[in-house]
Image (spheres, rainbow, N blue to C red):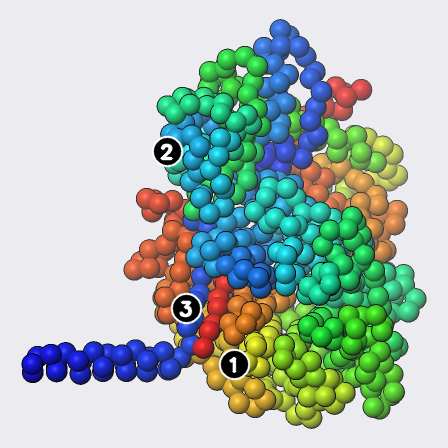
């Protein structure tokens, strides 16, 4: 009897402990997506993007600057995909064009919210500034993605999609046709391509090119143009307008963060909000921002960093994040929000992160904002770089307004000792229901201290000796390099 | 770039060639050459199980799939170093065309790479070939394909010069407002010989992208004192500011000096 009583108390306490543990922190999953069979690779697989099928979140597709293994293809670049929620990852080379070192140029991917069609905006590998908009209804098939749009010269296509009486697909891009550097006249280059029903129509599948910039620029806007979609048909696009008096890419730029809005999937021409000062279309969230142009923060180049997210439950609640600073060593991220559909914005930062880059925002169905960024800490506390080495810390904070909480430790805290742009110009986070999913790139030096608990590597690794291997027998040592990581966070 | 990678790139990028010789002339059937030109992975394998797959979540088992053990690799550029001996999934060219225990040579192109590998069989050669014969034919076809790729560049080049870089300097071409700015540099080349075309004077200036951005990493970069053979093109890219100037953008556009005699021979053969 006494033993039974003790056992019941023990069980009760155990349950309490478990509940307490669960309440202490979110469930975090972190995976290096390089597949086991590609363990011998040591490329700079940076600038990742991630798509998760909202209808079936076990279906995930990730992109990075990864060349297709020539064993698979030398003409098409790869996507990484998972059909089991990120437990295992595979390469499928279905993106037309393949640079032998990096696969593609800039690439972003998104699933529509129903139907499972995957869309991509990409600077075609080996083809310079040639932008392709792509589509596939079967990302595991060997059939290359269908080219819907093929246009030159373009930069940084950034893709978003939503299903509502057809797949609404928006690809923000910097249309360099209008750039004075390319012989253009207007210098207005911030643009969004969109289609209101892109799922099955033959190319161009309804895509049209739409200029967003209305103000005079120095000759060209900065590359980042980022759309955010709400189920009601409200569409925001943020871009970095390069002011008329800007140095215009001569080491720095002087730019404004501009947000435009449309309330019916773009049919109104993105004229829903007007700046209260100059009365022109699009509200300037911040003006006169000095931004280094391709200056180095550690080994990473910085200069054009921007993200925007809308609350899925409130089309008028929108957050924007950007980076600025003439001195790249002090490049600083800022987060602000609007609660009236972008008409007015918080006058001060809700969040400020110094010496950081790659801001990415998403808002889940609880209205919680997820904020991903990568911060250089010097000297850092990471392993594998030697004493005093600077470290890239990848953080994911959640919060609302000014109330933010970081994870107990960074997702990654890795040495900045690999030259040549170790992160890429962007990372990504998105929300499906309550859960956040994201992708970032980081040095894969295998020390568990460098990553969030229970990080999973598919590639061959010996954690005790901190070595990577190209084979199962661990006879071929592979040097540390940059890998793409997928993560998810659920409260 | 690793030589094997260049080889694979060249081979796969080539269009399928019409057969040059009949089987009796070359000892290699046209069908086999066609398969080799399409293939990214040729191996001798033993069928372990039919109607089966090593990747059940990604490749559905059917009469068109089989698990095959890789016994001997004949062509596999960039393959996992321990691929031999592993079991992989083959999507067969013809369903039901293999039996468990059967050993044959598979001409395939890759499909999926994850915890395992899935490949697509392209077909079977008309006649029976042993692995060493296949290996010889792969090497012969490779050599031919590499020559054809270089021949193509030679044919499209406006001028070909052998020489030495005497100076490298930033170009005055305006930078573009993109992180993909090529950062054009000029290499002045003292000409030892003009192999094709007409180049006025004893030097020629070639433009190359000095940027280490992803878009330009594969392009040749030059240093003072570097010797070699330049296959010169104009209008290789639509970027502004380079009209009527010679550019070097592709790895094949610059060859080691030791390749000069080969280039001369390929030019001669092409005539």
Q: Relative to B254, say whether A376 is above or below.
A: below
Q: Secondary structure at mark 2?
A: loop
Q: Nearer the viewer, mark 3 or mark 1?
A: 1
- Could you tell me if the residues under marks 1 and 2 are in contact, i.e. CB atoms within 8 Å? no
Who is closer to the viewer here, A43 or B85? Answer: B85
Where does the image place residue A174, in percent across and percent down from the top left?
78, 65
Which is nearer the N-term, disc 3 or disc 1?
Answer: 1
Any part of residue A446 in sight: yes
Q: In the rendered structure, the residue with mark 3 lies on which chain?
A: A
**Residue found at the very far front of the displayed protein:** A1
Q: Label 3, on which residue?
A: A451
Quarter of the image for the N terminus of chain A: give it.
bottom left
Quarter of the image for the C terminus of chain A: give it.
bottom left
Q: Relative to B16, say whether A241 is above or below.
A: below
Quarter residue A328 falls in: bottom right
Disc number at residue A398?
Answer: 1
| Disc 1 from disc 2: Cα separation | 47 Å
Where does the image place residue A434, in percent across and percent down from the top left?
52, 74
**Residue found at the very far top of the displayed protein:** B24
Who is closer to the viewer here, B18 or A232? Answer: A232
- Could you tell me if the residues under marks 3 and 1 are in contact, i.e. CB atoms within 8 Å? no
Crowding around mark 2 (Cα neighbors within 10 Å: few <14, some 14 to 19, many 20+) is: some
Q: Label 2, on which residue?
A: B85
Any part of residue A418 in sight: no
């Amino acid at each position: 009897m006494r033993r039974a009583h003790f056992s019941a108390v023990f069980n009760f306490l155990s349950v309490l402990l478990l509940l307490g543990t669960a309440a202490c922190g979110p469930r975090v999953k972190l995976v290096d997506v390089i597949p086991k069979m590609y363990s011998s690779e040591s490329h700079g697989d940076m600038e990742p993007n991630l798509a998760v099928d909202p209808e079936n979140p076990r279906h995930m597709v990730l992109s990075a600057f990864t060349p297709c293994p020539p064993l698979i293809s030398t003409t098409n670049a790869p996507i990484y995909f998972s059909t089991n929620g990120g437990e295992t990852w595979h390469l499928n080379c279905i993106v037309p064009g393949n640079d032998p070192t990096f696969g593609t140029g800039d690439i972003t991917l998104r699933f529509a919210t129903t139907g499972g069609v995957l869309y991509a905006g990409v600077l075609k590998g080996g083809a310079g500034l040639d932008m392709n908009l792509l589509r596939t209804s079967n990302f595991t098939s060997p059939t290359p993605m269908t080219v819907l749009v093929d246009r030159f010269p373009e930069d940084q296509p950034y893709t978003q999609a939503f299903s509502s009486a057809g797949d609404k697909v928006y690809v923000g891009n910097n249309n360099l046709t209008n750039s004075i550097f390319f012989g253009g006249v207007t210098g207005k280059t911030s643009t969004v391509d969109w289609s209101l029903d892109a799922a099955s129509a033959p190319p161009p599948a309804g895509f049209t090119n739409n200029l967003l910039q209305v103000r005079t620029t120095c000759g060209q806007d900065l590359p980042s143009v980022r759309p955010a979609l709400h189920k009601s048909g409200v569409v925001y696009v943020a871009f970095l307008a390069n002011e008329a008096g800007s140095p215009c890419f001569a080491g720095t730029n002087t730019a404004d963060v501009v947000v435009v809005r449309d309330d019916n999937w773009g049919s109104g021409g993105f004229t829903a909000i007007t700046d209260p000062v100059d009365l022109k279309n699009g509200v300037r969230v911040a003006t006169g921002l000095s931004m280094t142009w391709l200056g180095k923060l550690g080994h990473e180049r910085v200069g054009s960093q921007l993200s925007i997210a809308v609350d899925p439950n409130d089309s008028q609640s929108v957050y924007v994040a950007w980076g600025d600073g003439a001195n790249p060593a002090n490049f600083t991220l800022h987060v602000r929000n609007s609660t009236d559909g972008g008409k007015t914005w918080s006058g001060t930062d809700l969040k400020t992160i110094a010496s950081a880059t790659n801001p990415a925002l998403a808002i889940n169905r609880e209205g919680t904002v997820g904020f991903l960024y990568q911060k250089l800490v010097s000297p850092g506390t990471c392993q594998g770089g030697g004493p005093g080495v600077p470290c890239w810390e990848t953080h994911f904070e959640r919060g609302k307004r000014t109330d933010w909480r970081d994870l107990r430790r960074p997702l990654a805290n890795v040495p900045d000792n690999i030259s040549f742009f170790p992160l890429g110009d962007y990372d990504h986070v998105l929300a499906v229901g309550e859960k956040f999913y994201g992708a970032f790139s980081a040095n894969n030096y295998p020390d568990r201290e460098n990553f969030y608990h229970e990080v999973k590597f598919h590639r061959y690794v010996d954690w005790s000796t901190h070595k990577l291997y190209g084979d199962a027998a661990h006879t071929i040592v592979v040097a540390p390099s940059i890998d793409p990581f997928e993560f998810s966070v659920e409260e | 770039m690793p030589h094997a990678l260049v080889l694979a790139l060249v081979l796969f990028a080539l269009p399928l060639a019409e057969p040059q010789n009949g089987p009796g002339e070359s000892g290699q059937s046209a069908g086999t050459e066609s398969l080799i030109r399409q293939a990214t992975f040729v191996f001798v394998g033993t069928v372990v199980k039919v109607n089966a797959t090593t990747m059940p979540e990604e490749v559905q088992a059917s009469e068109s799939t089989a698990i095959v053990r890789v016994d001997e690799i004949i062509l596999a550029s960039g393959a996992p170093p321990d691929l031999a001996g592993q079991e992989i999934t083959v999507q067969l060219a013809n369903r039901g065309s293999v039996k468990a225990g059967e050993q044959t040579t598979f001409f395939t192109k890759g499909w999926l790479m994850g915890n395992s590998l899935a490949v697509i069989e392209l077909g079977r050669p008309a006649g029976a070939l042993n692995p060493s014969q296949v290996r010889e034919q792969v090497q012969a076809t490779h050599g031919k394909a590499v020559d054809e790729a270089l021949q193509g560049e030679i044919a499209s080049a406006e001028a070909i010069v052998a020489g030495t870089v005497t100076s490298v300097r930033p170009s005055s071409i305006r930078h573009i407002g993109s992180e993909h700015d090529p950062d054009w540099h000029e290499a002045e080349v003292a000409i030892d010989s003009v192999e094709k075309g007409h180049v006025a004077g004893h030097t020629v200036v070639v433009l190359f992208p000095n940027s280490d951005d992803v878009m330009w990493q594969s392009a040749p970069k030059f240093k003072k004192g570097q010797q070699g053979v330049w296959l010169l093109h104009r209008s290789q890219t639509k970027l502004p500011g380079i009209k009527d100037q010679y550019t070097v953008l592709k790895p094949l556009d610059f060859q080691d000096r030791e390749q000069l005699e080969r280039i001369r021979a390929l030019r001669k053969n092409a005539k």
